[in-house]
């Protein structure tokens, strides 16, 4: 038998320092939950367009209850997000803070992701049960999920689509101008497809997604825009089997939470015509836990995985690979599916995701 490990004496200073760390975590979690409220209520946008103002003025501009706004502002002050002048009892959002907290934020709106923190709290009872049973959840179990994902996609995909993302797929812009068949697999509300269909009227676009509410929203948006070269379809991609149908296929943050990601990637390979291109965005973390200690917002991504991406895959009887399935896993699956010339990119505006371009 191996000898007993050496007993390490209890270090009170270390224990107290760790307790302080936990206090900071709890404080930050509370601020994040309130950030979600502020984002959804438009309060950061109001503050970003006002000089220092009283809670009355801020609430009036936002058409909200002053008493609730004042208490929310107190959280933002304690969190170091909003500044407060006690003499004038005015609040302000510094321009440097607004740069990542408003809907026009030049650095991207990070308040969008605070909604995921709030959603974790909303899903806690359901998760408690799943920890005991090992069962999964369905997309429809999550409140406001498609609102959250549409905002995320809007700034990481749609806003960068033409200047940054499409150029990754060499020559695809010219082919879209001429006219080709395009599929977005797991299109959600179809924000990227709507933009593509408007820009390239000679091409034909299709969007498939499992969620009926998302497809209904996308269909209404296409109709309102008068787009006749775009169709959306509620479709479970499990067992998807169209052959030689498309010239260009995209998937944006849609593969890792599928029932069987490998089978989906293989079916998308089969759906491409010879020489067709696949553009795939997914989470860019590593499959190895130890490689993610410096990855942007890794703890949040693992939490989102535990709350959503893993359970929805398990709920379909799937593998439950989770959000941090790893770029290595994705790249291996692309090769196994038969894709050639697989190229991996990480874009400056989107360090949390990885982009693959591969040829059938």
Image: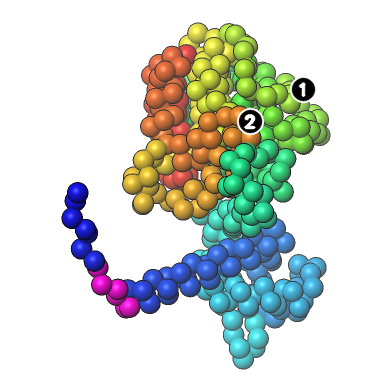
How far apart marks 1 and 2 lie (CA) works out to: 33 Å
Q: Which residues are magenta?
A: 8-13
Q: Determine the main secondary structure of the stretch shown in magenta.
A: loop
Left/right of residue 68 with respect to residue 105 in the rendered view? right
Q: Answer yes or no: do the residues labelled 1 and 2 have beta carbons within 8 Å?
A: no
Please give the residue where the numbered disc 1 appears in the rendered image.
228
Can you tell which quarter of the image residue 195 is in?
top right
Q: Look at the image and say whether residue 12 sits in the magenta stretch.
A: yes
Q: Residue at x 59, y 34 (%)?
A: 313
Residue positioned 65% across, 86% down in the render: 89
Residue 152 shows in the view:
no
Pointer 2 local density, CA inside 10 Å: few below 14, some 14–19, many at least 20: some
Residue that label 2 marks: 316
- Identify the mark nearer the N-term, 1 or 2: 1
Camera-side residue: 230 or 22?
A: 22
- Looking at the image, which residue sits at the far bottom? 87
Residue 285 in the image: state x and y as whole percent.
42, 42
Q: Position of residue 171 (x, y in %)?
A: 48, 20
Q: Which mark is residue 114?
A: none
Q: Residue at x 42, y 36 (%)?
A: 326
User: Percent position (x, y) of residue 295?
Assistant: 39, 49
């Amino acid at each position: 038998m191996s000898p007993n490990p050496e007993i390490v004496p209890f270090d009170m200073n270390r224990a107290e320092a760790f307790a302080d760390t936990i206090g900071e975590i709890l404080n930050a979690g509370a601020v994040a939950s309130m950030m979600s409220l502020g984002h959804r209520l438009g309060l950061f946008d109001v503050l970003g367009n006002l000089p220092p103002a009283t809670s009355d003025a801020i609430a009036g501009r936002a058409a909200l209850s002053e008493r609730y706004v004042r208490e929310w502002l107190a959280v933002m002050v304690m969190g170091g997000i909003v500044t407060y002048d006690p003499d004038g009892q005015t609040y302000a959002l510094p321009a440097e803070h607004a740069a990542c907290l408003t809907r026009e934020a030049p650095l991207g709106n990070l308040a969008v992701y605070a909604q995921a923190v709030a959603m974790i709290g909303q899903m806690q009872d359901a998760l408690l049960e799943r920890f005991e049973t090992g069962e999964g959840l369905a997309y429809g179990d999550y409140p406001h999920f498609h609102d959250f994902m549409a905002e995320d996609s809007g700034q990481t995909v749609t806003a960068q689509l033409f200047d940054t993302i499409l150029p990754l797929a060499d020559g695809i812009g010219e082919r879209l101008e001429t006219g080709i068949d395009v599929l977005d697999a797991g299109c959600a509300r179809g924000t990227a497809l709507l933009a593509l269909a408007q820009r390239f009227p000679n091409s034909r676009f299709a969007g498939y997604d499992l969620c009926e509410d998302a497809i209904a929203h996308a269909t209404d948006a296409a109709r309102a825009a008068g787009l006749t070269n775009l169709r959306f379809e509620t479709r479970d991609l499990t067992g998807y089997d169209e052959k030689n149908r498309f010239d260009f296929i995209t998937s944006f943050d849609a593969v890792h939470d599928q029932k069987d990601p490998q089978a989906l990637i293989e079916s998308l390979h089969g759906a491409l015509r010879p020489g067709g291109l696949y553009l795939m965005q997914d989470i860019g973390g590593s499959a190895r836990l130890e490689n993610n200690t410096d990855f942007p917002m890794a703890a949040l991504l693992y939490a989102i995985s535990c709350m959503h991406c893993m359970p929805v895959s398990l709920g379909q009887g799937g593998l439950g690979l989770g959000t941090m399935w790893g770029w290595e896993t994705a790249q291996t699956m692309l090769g196994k599916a038969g894709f050639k010339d697989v190229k991996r990119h990480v874009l400056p505006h989107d360090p949390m995701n990885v982009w693959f371009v591969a040829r059938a």
